[in-house]
Image: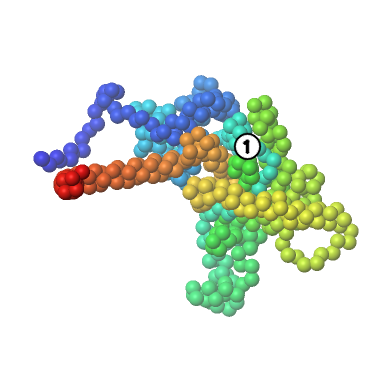
Amino acid sequence: MAMSTRKPESQESLWVETAALRQSPGHPFYEKLNELFRAYGFDAFVEGRCSKYYHEKMGRPSIAPGIYFRMLLIGYFEGIDSERGIAWRVADSLGLRRFLGCELGDSTPDHSSVSRTRRMMEIETHQEVFGWVLTLLAKESLLKGKTLGIDGTTLEANAALRSIVRRDTGEKYHEYLTRLAKASGIETPTRADLAKLDKKRPKKGSNEDWEHPEDPDAKIGKMKDGRTHLLHKAEHATDMETGAVVAVTLADGNEGDTESGPWTLMQAQENLKKVGEDEAAKKEISETVKEAVLDKGYHSNDVLVHLEEEQVRSYVSEPDRGRRRWEGKEIEQAAVYANRRRINGEHGKALMRKRGEIVERSFAHCYETGAMRRLHLRHRGNILKRLLVHVAGFNLGLVMRSLIGRGTPRGLRALLGRFFDFAARQLRALFERLVHFVAFAPIRQRNHAGAVTSAEMTTSATGC
């Protein structure tokens, strides 16, 4: 065989024959997802909601709304954290081009066009797309909305701690330490002097004194692994029966659970109310938000009283606070004792066990395998827009799992890989049996002939 050589770089042809271009059969996961979108009119819905952002005639054609939201969904399905990475992946894949509806001769949207489209569209439009997916889940009998589990997690902000500045003077951290050292009598402080001075200062990382100049919404706090970062807090309200995320909110990284929890519950109630406006979906969610399951971080008198006022049965883990005084707090006492009775019952204990499984699973899919634990956007509005579509992709994965058995393309690829491995093992075992049969065939023939001869000799000897 002769060795082929790589052709040197040359000028591309001016005309390309369309029939000569390589065609892609499409990825089976994305082909099925496009069928689902066509069946429920996704493109017509988003184009109708986004028409107010565009002029009828002026300007060059923009990214189609259906393509924009599909690209953000690809970020979840492919586990890509940045919009630049999504644009690179789409440009490199024939299957994703087919999913977006881009012809081979068309250029795919770059990251700057995606970013500009995101900034142009309001949060309410992304919230409507999230609600459309919830309605789809209800029509597919994958949303009940009776029992919700609420929990939050931290997301690392796209901002560095070394860049924070003082809120009052605008000084950087190093400049501020240098000024303190000089005020204490050290004329030319070294790095060791600054570190020694900084170590003894109380509350040196207070959010009341420091902020990031480019992302003031990011707050100083500790991640789940114990590291200190600038971060945001994402909170999910998850359907405990189906695992669907009913609401997602974004709060300050230092905001307590007792402050953010009621807002997430309110958003979940609003989303389910809008889903109930669809007649086909309303049949599946006759009862909305009757029970709320939360961990001990949400336990407070105000939260429990709020749930009682909303006629929601609370199942909130109670921390050990010792003996409490209830003088003048009869309403709070009744709410706390009622919650205590419920969490000690069999139904309450079962819900507590299930909360850790269902709610934490949505965090793992969205932020670990979905690659959104580390953010690449700044300002709460931009982050929430991306987050709403990202979590909508997680909800679409529940529908895809009911249709094809897996909720992401990577999961489908792993399933097919296991199938082919099983088929290969079976074929290998069959081949080994066949080789064994062929190799020992002469021995079996000789043994059979010897057995017949012995039988004839025995018969002649006995005269039978």
Q: Which residue lies at the image location 54% right of the left edge and 54% below the top edge? A: 156
The spot of residue 330 in percent (x, y) is: 87, 56
Q: Which of these two is toward me, 385 or 2?
A: 2
Callout 1: SS: loop
Q: Is residue 131 left or right of residue 452?
A: right
Q: Is residue 38 left or right of residue 413?
A: right
Q: How crowded is mark 1: few (under 14 residues within 10 Å), some or many (20 or more)?
A: many
Amino acid at circle 1? Leu
Q: Which residue lies at the image location 16% right of the left edge and 49% below the top edge? A: 461
The spot of residue 6 in percent (x, y) is: 18, 40
Q: Can residue 164 be seen in this view?
A: no
On screen, residue 51 above or below 389: above
Q: Which residue lies at the image location 34% right of the left edge and 42% below the top edge? A: 423
Image quadrant where residue 24 sits = top left
Identify the residue under disc 1.
Answer: 143
Q: What colouring method underlies this structural image?
A: rainbow
Q: Residue furthest top?
A: 57
Q: Is residue 178 visible?
A: yes
Give the quarter of the figure containing the N terminus: top left
The spot of residue 385 in percent (x, y) is: 57, 40
On screen, residue 389 above or below 21: below
Q: Which residue lies at the image location 76% right of the left edge and 47% below the top edge? A: 313
Q: Is residue 303 left or right of residue 400?
A: right
On screen, residue 197 above or below 58: below
Image quadrant where residue 26 sits = top left
